[in-house]
Amino acid sequence: MIFNLINVVLPVFVVVGIGYVLTLRGMFQQVQMDGLMKFAQGVAIPFLLFRAMAGIDLQSGFDPRLLISFYIGAGACFFAGFFGARLIFKRDWEDCVAIGFCCLFSNSVLLGLPITERAFGPDALVGNYAIIAFHSPFCYALGITAMEVIRNRGQGGLRTVKSVFRSIFKNNLIIAILAGFAVNLSGLSIPEPVDEALALVAKAGLPTALFALGGIMVQYRPEGDLRTIAMVCCIALLLHPAIVYGLGSALDVRQDLFRSGVMNAAMAPGVNAYIFANMYGRAKRVAASSVLIATASSVVTVLLWLTLLS
């Protein structure tokens, strides 16, 4: 069984590793990898999510018990990272928000989708897409709200609300998800030639993003407070999936959705964790190092969770 699970997980990380090695050796420049990631996250993956949301069975996929178990876990991990950074490591409040965001934002698209698909098949992705539909809005709303409240120090709620909505609705992934929902709820179907064109571009999204993710990681260095990074890795890779596993079991979440919830929670922090830290200029070294080290560590921890689910 372990050998089969390794066959499931390893190809995903091999693609990341190829991108890392080729960029490290100078075959690709950082600007080229940034361009690939921009295409993947700005075009191909939004097309993928749009098609998925337009065709998803809303009744079977959007089980409140799945969303409750996943997002209670995510929120708990944000506050665990936030207060851990403050009480244990004495970081500034704004640093604490950025560190909490690293614990909150799992890489549900670039890693969660391909690993879940390889482990359980394409039909098992309904729960993944249900989680992804709320992932960026929830995470950015929580992170931005916390940061703006701390930065504004009570100078007015309107500015905070405007900042939250502006940041959320500038995100291509969120726009694609909302557009897909609109098509789904309208009952309209995408014309076949258009759908096939979207599918062609969408198929390039995940492999391109994985390859570019490896290249982008070359610029990250394992710097900063290693104890803080270790805390982030433990919260993101162990605590979050453990909470989802416990709540999902208690709420009797359907098996395929339960697997999606645990596997999404078990993913390392995504590049968005660094983007958020960079956006506010807080805890950037911790965020960058956490993305790198947690992604490498997740090769082992994902195997542990897959073994438990199998």
Image (cartoon, rainbow, N blue to C red):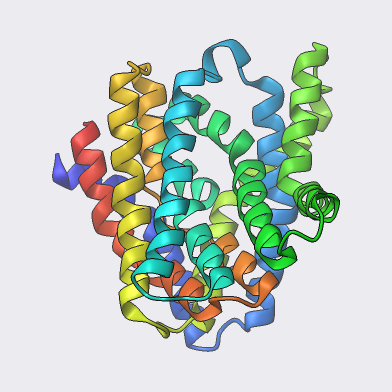
- Is 226 situated left or right of 168 in this image? left
User: Image point 80% across, 61% down: which residue?
Assistant: 155
User: Image point 33% across, 42% down: which residue?
Assistant: 241
Quadrant, the C terminus: top left
How many discs mark residues in the rendered view? 0
Task: Determine the image quadrant of residue 180.
Answer: top right
Q: Residue furthest front?
A: 154
- Is 172 situated left or right of 283 in this image? right
Task: Determine the image quadrant of residue 275.
Answer: bottom right
In the image, is residue 140 above or below residue 218? above
**Is 12 or 87 nearer to us in this picture?**
87
- Is 91 situated left or right of 271 in this image? left
Quadrant, the N terminus: top left
User: Image point 42% across, 84% down: which residue?
Assistant: 224
**Is 19 or 50 nearer to us in this picture?**
50
In the image, is residue 259 above or below residue 171? above
**Is 28 or 150 nearer to us in this picture?**
150
Q: Residue furthest bottom?
A: 26
What is the x, y in percent for residue 99? 49, 66
What is the x, y in percent for residue 157? 80, 50
Q: From this viewpoint, is residue 201 visible?
A: no
What is the x, y in percent for residue 106? 48, 51
Q: From this viewpoint, is residue 160 visible?
A: yes
User: Image point 50% across, 67% down: which residue?
Assistant: 96
What is the x, y in percent for residue 132? 58, 38
